[in-house]
Image (cartoon, rainbow, N blue to C red):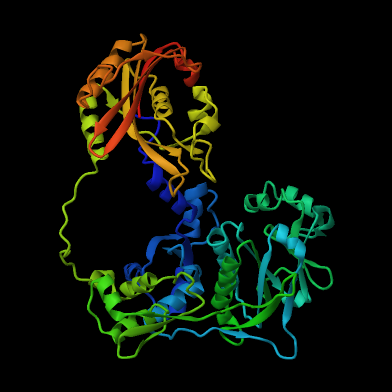
């Protein structure tokens, strides 16, 4: 029997998946011929797939612009699209240095020992010619931080320019959290003049011509203009409810940008731009520094002085002055024995240092070989702990080259008691003639509240911060809505329908470190033209028999009538079942004519309901 939902696991594992889903693994699309030209040699698809694997990446798809449009919009829309072969490469979410062709090629070339790790330099112009960005006090109410830099005498081509724009978008979607934490603005420095001022003003005071528009708009009009824009509408909520909006001016009062929404048209860059002024406004200064470092290190390769970046002075409201970009190098020491032990290999310190250098972590052995000193470049913000360094050593060594050994620790696995009980119950309940359903762990607020005649605030439901659909707004607090939706989806099936589910529900619990707790519940539904109380009662008795709980008042269970405004008829029992090292409180319900929970097309039938938790 098809269910209305699919299988789902709730609680900690579900929450972890949700957290990971917020930062999806980025996919970098690069033109194959352009990539091979930058690498200095050609590969077959199989050879390049193997190279990616060796470097810790994955060649996800080989396609073309024409194929992509054809799949998404149909063959008619793909007419005239490019047939150039594209490689779609999956990149780890924290490897910001691999989000563009330039970083990818640089990383692979260093990995194959064809080039050395570049040294990035911050250059301060002589004679006080440094560009300045002044931050006013008003910005503290919206986006208090800003960093900036200049790429001087850069040589763009069409492909380089496209890569530059694409990297900004990749960073916006990744570390910038859709511009909520950081917003990047790039400007043609030759069309504006410093010092620049980063301030915040009321929407009516801000007026400029947005990027690629033909006339000027006020800030409020700009938000209305882009409210239906498929790309920019997702960023409007960041500032639209603020009393003042952030804005950057040059010394002549020309608007450079209104972050995080749109740049001004006056300073837009193009393929002929020679000097690029980069500003990043932010609510998180650490993320802003990382974003700026990544952007300038990737494209300073095309500057007249390769890998050199012109610094900018940022002056805060209370006189504090900072020079950006930081391009900070730091050193870490890791013991070779620790690396060997964690990976499961036996390599000399010098070999380990060489492996790390291949991963853009310039390393050398110090002392008597007891330590390896590693220099962390500004491109590797993902290196936080020693384990990150060890992971890179393992990648360079090759996971397939690590010899498989039997673990020295002897352990005997044992099934989690609650899961063991659940599996035993599932088998016996299925043998009793009930069909198991597996429904989604996420549902809508209406499912667990409105349709059951309850207020959402009384459910202690865990809400999803940024739900993609109205069907998945909260973690379920009951198994009942899922089973009722399953019946609704199978209303054409012959009656009676006898369904059960044993799964976790999730409720808020401030005492837990994740703020929520899992409970294992059992819910059963008997759906027929007649109420079927005797069927659901027999089901309850069978469950209690399996759990060895006698039907008596002293140490077992009993059924009592109770009043509930949400249901026309309900019986309720309460008992405690003792297991070694744990105690489960169980509650059952029988409800007849639960009409407000169901769709109109099945509202004239009757239900027997059992809910154990």
Query: In the figure, is residue 410 to the left or right of 451?
Result: left
Indicate the position of residue 447 as horizontal and vertical percent values: 49, 29
Residue nearest the viewer, comparing 13 with 195: 13
Number of on-image labels: 0
Picture quadrant of residue 310: bottom right
The quadrant of the rendering that contains the C terminus is top left
Residue farthest toward the top in the current orientation of the protein: 530
- Against 210, residue 379 (above or below) is below
The quarter holding residue 539 reads top left
Q: Nearer the viewer, residue 537 or 102?
A: 537
Q: Is residue 502 left or right of residue 320?
A: left
Which percent across, then down, holds residue 608?
36, 16
Q: Is residue 263 visible?
A: no
Residue at 26%, 19% (x, y): give it: 554
Task: Give residue 442's position: percent from left, percent from top.
Answer: 44, 38
- Is residue 71 shown above or below 393? above
Q: Measuring 39% from the left and 30% from the top, which residue is drawn there?
A: 479
Quarter of the rendering containing residue 361: bottom left
- Residue sticking out furthest to the front: 554
- The answer to whether one can see residue 101 in this image is yes
Image position, residue 454 (x, y; %): 52, 25
- 213 and 590: which one is in front? 590
Instruction: Work out whether 376 lies above or below 431.
Output: below
- Residue 541 to residue 250: above or below: above
* Residue at left offset 25%, top offset 22%: 555
Quarter in which the N terminus is drawn? top left
Q: Nearer the viewer, residue 167 or 417?
A: 417
């Amino acid at each position: 029997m098809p269910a209305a939902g699919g299988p789902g696991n709730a609680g900690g594992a579900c929450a972890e998946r949700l957290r990971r889903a917020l930062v999806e693994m980025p996919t970098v699309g690069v033109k194959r011929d352009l990539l091979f030209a930058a690498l200095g040699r050609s590969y077959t698809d199989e050879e390049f797939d193997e190279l990616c694997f060796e470097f810790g990446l994955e060649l996800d798809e080989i396609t073309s612009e024409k194929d992509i449009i054809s799949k998404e919009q149909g063959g008619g829309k793909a007419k005239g699209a490019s047939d150039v072969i594209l490689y779609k490469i999956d990149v780890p979410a924290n490897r910001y240095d691999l989000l563009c062709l330039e970083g990818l090629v640089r990383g692979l070339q260093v990995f194959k020992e064809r080039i050395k790790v570049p040294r990035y330099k911050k250059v301060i112009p002589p004679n006080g010619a440094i560009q300045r960005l002044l931050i006013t006090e008003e910005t503290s109410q919206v986006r208090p931080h800003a960093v900036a830099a200049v790429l001087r005498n850069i040589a763009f081509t069409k492909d380089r320019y496209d890569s530059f724009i694409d990297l900004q978008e990749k960073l916006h979607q990744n570390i910038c959290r859709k511009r909520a934490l950081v917003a990047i603005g790039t400007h043609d420095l030759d069309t504006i003049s410093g010092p620049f001022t980063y301030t915040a003003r009321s929407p009516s005071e801000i007026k400029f011509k947005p990027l690629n528009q033909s006339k000027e708009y006020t800030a409020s009009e700009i938000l209305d203009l882009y409210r239906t824009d498929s790309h920019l509408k997702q960023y409007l909520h960041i500032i639209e409810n603020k009393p003042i909006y952030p804005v950057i001016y040059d010394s002549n009062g020309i608007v450079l940008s209104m972050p995080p929404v749109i740049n001004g048209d006056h300073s837009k860059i193009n393929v002929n731009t020679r000097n690029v002024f980069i500003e990043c406004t932010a609510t998180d200064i650490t993320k802003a520094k990382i974003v700026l470092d990544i952007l300038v290190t990737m494209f300073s390769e095309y500057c007249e002085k390769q890998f050199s970046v012109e610094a900018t002075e940022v002056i805060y409201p209370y006189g504090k002055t900072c020079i950006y970009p930081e391009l900070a190098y730091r050193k870490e020491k890791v013991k070779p024995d620790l690396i060997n032990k964690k990976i499961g290999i036996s390599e000399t310190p010098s070999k380990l240092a060489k492996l790390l250098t291949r991963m853009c972590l310039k390393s050398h052995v110090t002392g008597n070989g007891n330590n390896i000193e590693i220099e962390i470049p500004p491109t590797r913000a993902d290196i936080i702990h020693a384990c990150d360094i060890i992971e890179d050593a393992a990648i360079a060594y090759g996971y397939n080259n690590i010899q498989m050994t039997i673990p020295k620790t002897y352990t005997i696995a044992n099934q989690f008691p609650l899961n063991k009980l659940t599996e035993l119950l599932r088998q016996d309940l299925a043998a009793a003639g009930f069909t198991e359903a597996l429904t989604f762990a996420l549902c809508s607020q209406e499912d667990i509240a409105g349709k059951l005649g309850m207020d959402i605030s009384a459910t202690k439901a865990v809400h999803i911060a940024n739900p993609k659909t109205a069907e998945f707004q909260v973690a379920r607090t009951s198994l009942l809505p899922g089973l009722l939706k399953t019946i609704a989806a199978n209303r054409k099936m012959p009656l009676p329908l006898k369904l059960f589910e044993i799964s976790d529900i999730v409720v808020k619990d401030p005492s837990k470190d994740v703020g929520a707790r899992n409970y294992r519940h059992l819910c059963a539904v008997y759906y027929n033209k007649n109420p079927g109380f005797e069927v659901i009662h027999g089901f309850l008795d069978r469950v209690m028999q399996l759990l060895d709980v006698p039907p008596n008042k002293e140490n077992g269970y009993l059924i009592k009538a109770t009043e509930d405004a949400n249901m026309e008829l309900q019986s309720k029992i309460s008992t405690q079942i003792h297991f070694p090292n744990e105690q489960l409180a169980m509650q059952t319900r029988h409800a007849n004519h639960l009409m407000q929970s169901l769709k109109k097309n099945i509202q004239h039938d009757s239900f027997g309901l059992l809910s154990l938790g």
